[in-house]
Image: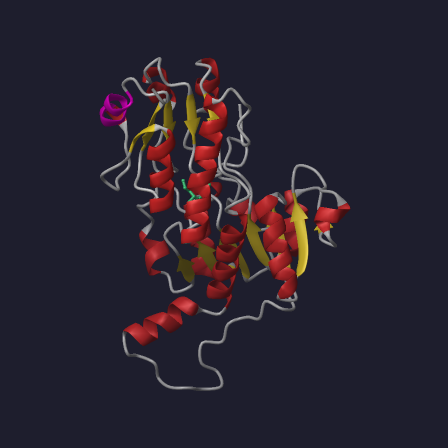
Amino acid sequence: MPPRVVITRPLPQPVEARAVQIFDAVLATEDTPLTGDALLARLEGAAALLPCVADKLPRPMINALPASVKIIANFGAGLDHLDLAALAERHIAITNTPDVLTDATADIAMLLMLGAARRAKEGMTQIREASWPGWSPTHLLGSSLGDKRLGIVGMGRIGTAIASRARGFGMTVHYHGRRRTDAGVETGAIFHASLEELLGISDVLVLACAATTETRHMINAERLAHLPQGAILINPARGDLLVDEDVITALKSGGLAAAGLDVFDGEPDLRAEYRDLPNVFALPHLGSATLETRTAMGMLALDNLEAFFAGRTPPNLIQ
Ligand code: 8YV
């Protein structure tokens, strides 16, 4: 009998087809997060869980998982919705799906940058509300990206992919990370040993780091004050990297000219100001949302499970 794998959400058709072919797969019939008792009931007798970012697994949930569960194959790169320490204590393996979503997420970062810099929200509002006064030399003037300095926080796979796109737009690339990356990966990007130093020169700041206890609320009033007046903040990573109140204050005062946000603390709920402020270009967590990418993510999650149950090391084993 193949191992039972519980999948929390509907996935692209080829992924579900392969899942039922190779596993005793329990597919999701509803597209809502699976949590609490409903999740525990579905996991009875299952060997694996395939969750996504919206399926929160804090310590009490992990402690309550049936003993049959041996691996969690996350659909996504970020693991901040899972308590890794609690999983390690229970000797439950965990894998994720990096690489395959790098390009799609870097593309969204560029969309956020362009949307914020070019005042796309205000333009779209004029179209929707039929309030476009007509072409004028001074109508909705945004700022060019080409001559700007881009500061990237976290030069990992996604940060590196954003850097190569930004170079194509003529931006000068700077970054801060835990360590300087190899010259081959850096390709001319300028390393800053401290975050504050990076902030000081970032006309556009993009967050491309993981959400951890160290990075939580990293962008607060004090850090925002280091940015050049009228900088643009881009967040395709995780909402809790920001202190929302401080970001909103800066957006209202003009300290920040604009923000491009794809992720929100407590999403899908978001602060009313992020909905209403004209200088916030916001998307509903679409970073990896292309059919190709979501299919590749699902296939990679299945690869990880296949390897695990065949006694091999899964390609994306975290712990
Ligand atoms: C995914 C993401 O769509 O991979 C991640 O960490 O943020 C998204 O691109 C999401 O996590 C799916 O679970």
Give the left or right position of residue 105, taking residue 34 as reference. right
Q: Main secondary structure of the magenta part?
A: helix
Whether residue 191 appears in this view of the structure is: no
Position of 171 relative to 211 (above/below): below
- Residue 251 belongs to magenta span: no
Q: Where residue 83 appears, x then y in whole percent? A: 43, 25
Task: Answer left or right for 64 relative to 175.
Answer: left
Q: Position of residue 31 (x, y in %)?
A: 26, 42
Quarter of the image that includes the N terminus: top left
x and y percent of residue 162 in the render?
Answer: 59, 54
Ligand 1 rendered quadrant:
top left
Residue nearest the observer in this picture, 260 or 55: 55
Residue 107 in the image: above or below residue 302? below
Image-based side of 230 in relation to 139, left or right: right
Depth check, front residue: 259 or 208: 208
State the residue lying farthest toward the right. 183
User: Foreground residue, 132 or 163?
Assistant: 163
Res. 281 visible in picture: yes
Q: Residue 76, position in %: x, y? A: 45, 39
In the image shown, does 99 or 300 lie closer to the viewer? Answer: 300
State which region is magenta.
37-43
Question: Is 91 left, or right, of 171 in this rendering?
Answer: left
User: Looking at the image, what colour scheme do you see?
Assistant: secondary structure
Count of number-bearing discs: 0
